[in-house]
Amino acid sequence: MTIRATTDIASLLPGAACHSLAIRLDHGFDSERARERLAEADMQTVYGGAKLWTTRVHARAAAPEAQRRRAAEATRPIRAGVAPLRAVLLHYDDGQDLILVADRSRIPLPSLRQAATLLTSENPTSGAALACGILQEPAPDTGRRDALRPAWGLPDHHDVSLTGWTSLKLALESGIDRTSLTGATALTVARYSGDEAVRLGTLDPAEHLEPRVITLKTHEGQDVSELLARAGVRPGERTDHEPLPSVGIIHTKEGQEEYEPSLAPVFPLTLRVTERADGTLDATCRFEEAAVSRTIAEQFCSYLVRVAADLGVRTGPRLLTDVAPLTGETARDILALGGLGTMAPSSGSSGGAIHQRFAKIAGMSPHATCLTAGSTQLTYQELNIRAEICAAGLRDVGVAPGDLVGVCLERDADLIVVLLAVLKAGAAYVPMDTRHPVDRLRYTAADAGLRVVVTTLDTFPAPDGAVVVSPAEVTQRGTASPSPEPEHSADSGASTAYVIYTSGSTGRPKGVVVPHRNVIALVEATTADFRLGPDDTWTLFHSSAFDFSVWEMWGCLLTGGRLVVVPYWVTRDTDEFCELVLTERVTVLNQTPSAFSQLLNAGQLHERESALRLIIFGGEPLDTRMLETWYARRSPASCRLVNMFGITETTVHVTSHTVTPKDVASGSRSVGKPLPGWHLSVRDRHGRLLPPGATGELCVGGAGVADRYLGKPDLTAERFVHDPLTGELVYRSGDQGRMWPDGTFDHLGRSDNQVKLRGYRIELDEIRAALIDCGGISAAAVTVRQDDPANPASRRLDGYVAAADDTLDLDAVQARLRAVLPDYMVPSTLTILTEIPLTINGKLDKTRLPDPRTAATRFPAVSAEVAPQTSRVALADPAATIVRIWSAILKTEVGLDDNFFRLGGNSLMVVQAIAALRTEGLPKVSSTEFYKNSTARQLISLVQQLTEASP
């Protein structure tokens, strides 16, 4: 992967267009005669007024100083607008050096050598004869050297001093020839860039003036001999519009004179290779400091030498996969940079399990408030007692240590009591959201083999023989027949704490089994850095079925803080949530970037005094540029913003990075360094370790790696793999990323068909499978679009279906999807196509999918009143205002009977719509009321009623 250079190389490094000859002369050289020859009329015409300059080097100058002066003159480029040749004579006590520097496009190497002959020979060719061998006009485009800078170069773009170039010497083994070095360069670039087809630049001044390009395929399944055969092919000419590759090779041969084919890198990273008389190679790497950091260049060259040596060993058939993997001390250094060997700081006060640590905190601070849920407030002692009673009730209904217990409750005090009680009973909880479709609840309960489910739903689809009880019933049983808490083994931290189900690529969710010790490790790894403690107030904002809630609940309760449970409808209303944050004096707030985007313009958060000191982003990638509004109103010192990367399978969080205004300005994608106890590395598709700078799959090891997928041994073996380099189990995340030389990581998106939407991890294949199961659909595709790059709330799912016939009922399709998928997985739009467009390789061709907002069959429900007419008629307020607001947010014309959610609306857009209504001076509409009145006509009627009822 490469990005286009912002400036051309010639303007930044003019030496890229120049070359030089340095010739050693004795004292017999007649400089005056040479000066006269250069002054001849014919030669003045050719060289544009070039002169021979003489410089005396002080007699006492040591040899190293003389060499430095020689090198300095030989590498000093010609300025634009002056003669195309500069001739300098360096005069020492023991000899002289003639240095000729020329514009390569006007004076190629043969002509430069002729000029040297003219000045140094006793009987030189006449100036007129020499003139015919010199280019009189510059070749087209020679003043420009546009090039692609490597994304893996990782320079410090904030260091304005990086405008020069640096050279590194390569220690090549004697068996390496030109072909094997070319093949090794291509293979090294392929492993750094992740691209199998590699474009290499090449320049041989003896054969052509301008750089040329050779394209090499480095498919890892091919034989070494095939790559070497391709590496020996002559390069093709470069078209005028084609940029130079980021890496190239300049070839020269050893001669009597010292020849520099380019005084600065022709390519951002240039290998200068000289073939000696004995056939061995001498190589130097030159690189632009503005394109490649020194650390990356050194590592690149070190790895290149290893690959070249390995390719140079001709031992019969070998695959490229087996060539020079990173092992040994080099691998250990890279792994250590990624956190291997770090340990989470232990508080020394925790037990082996979550509930044991909670009980100790309750014993130390029994009267401290730990839970606020509406009008309910519980101290640590009260919560601990309630949980013990509930645990006794669970044991009374048959829960035994090691069981999985389903918990499907609203966000309230009972939820926290029951989850803690399940752990106290020695069991593990399986959280489910009360708003999940019945089919998903049924599948989760059956797949987990639940024998007990705690819920307030009257119609929970429990498996046959399962016990379904409410929190009140469990508490009643526990009060009537209390039983002692079961004894736990010394290694109770190894037992399962919870199983959370995530979206699955097979069309069904999969359960992730997480032990107690992982959660304890997460808390201990973050407590000191985040200064978590009894003075903090947290919010439980997220569903218990979303693993962000694990961090919110236990991060707070295991550090002595107070947890404020946020009701579902409050999470959907920006004004109400902001009021809660302010009145409850919340200090630690956890948000997905999509949800936080709604708070950025909330006036009360900026206008009123807030207790917020720490905001943590997680659940989905953060576009740091969205925080420009935040830092425009608040000082970075007033509240710390932290971006954390993590996965359910690695216990919520893996890394942390404090976001600064500098990150916002640069659009940084950094997720920081791994937490103590976690380690992170970048691997290629074969699981091989990649060096800093290279893009690959992020693999996580250490304290947070979950046990397995529940009941899925094959999938577990595929994703939880034994790593021979570390000797540990690591999780293959499927996320793309890269490591920087300082050990920080960038998150670069997904490598598969998985996306993050409003914090939820979604397998698009699960939605696709659900679409095909609807009947009447022969093929389907699902994509993610974001209409407004600056607004995460505009990100949505678009579904496309190929119908078996033209009678497909899209209303019925969407109704079926809502019955089997959570709301956040139901596509906002559905479009009927005659067929799903595919690439030549049989993959989905997203470029040929129509925009669903212009497709005739784009929405499941089409209004009887044509939207364009509706939006233009003179509707009375508030009707015109509501239609206008909806049209702007949904980016489509809206009819009176159109449904907000059928037109692509989502929960975040609801927040925007409510805020816009208030801005227009209309009465406050709660999120609950909005959901219950989701057509334009219904909402207009509601607003009119509220207006009439207001004083």
Image: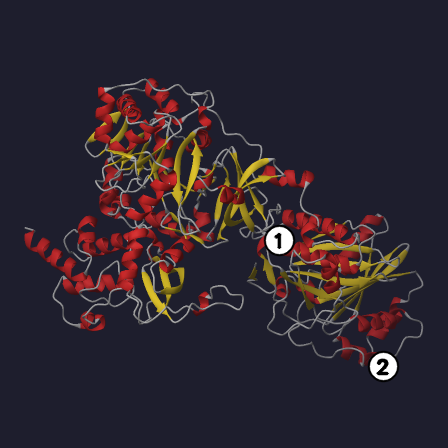
Residue 42 horizontal side relative to residue 838, left or right: right
Say which residue appears at 17% left-offset and 55% top-offset. Answer: 933
In the picture, measured across the screen, residue 465 lies left or right of residue 401, that is left
Figure check: 595 above or below 360: below
Inter-mark Cα distance, 2 to 1: 50 Å
In the drawing, does residue 90 fall left or right of residue 581? Answer: right
Q: Quadrant of residue 233?
A: bottom right
Reply above or below: 402 against 842.
Answer: above
Q: Residues within 10 Å of mark 2 (few under 14, many from 20)?
A: few
- Judge by depth and name the residue closer to the eye, 891 or 225: 225
Which mark, residue 192? 1
Instruction: Pick whichever of labels 2 and 1 is earlier in the sequence.
Output: 2
Q: Tell me whether the residue at label 2 lies in contact with that at label 1, contact meaning CB atoms closer than 8 angstroms.
A: no
What is the count of numbered marks? 2
Helix, strand or loop for disc 1: helix
Which class describes the residues within 10 Å of circle 1: few (<14), some (14-19), or many (20+)?
many
Q: Is residue 366 visible?
A: yes
The chosen color scheme is: secondary structure
Q: Position of residue 635 (x, y in %)?
A: 37, 43
Q: Residue at x 57, y 58 (%)?
A: 1
From the top left corner, tell me how far across and down residue 154 is, in percent: 58, 51
Residue ID for mark 2: 129
Q: Could you tell me if residue 904 is visible in this image?
A: no
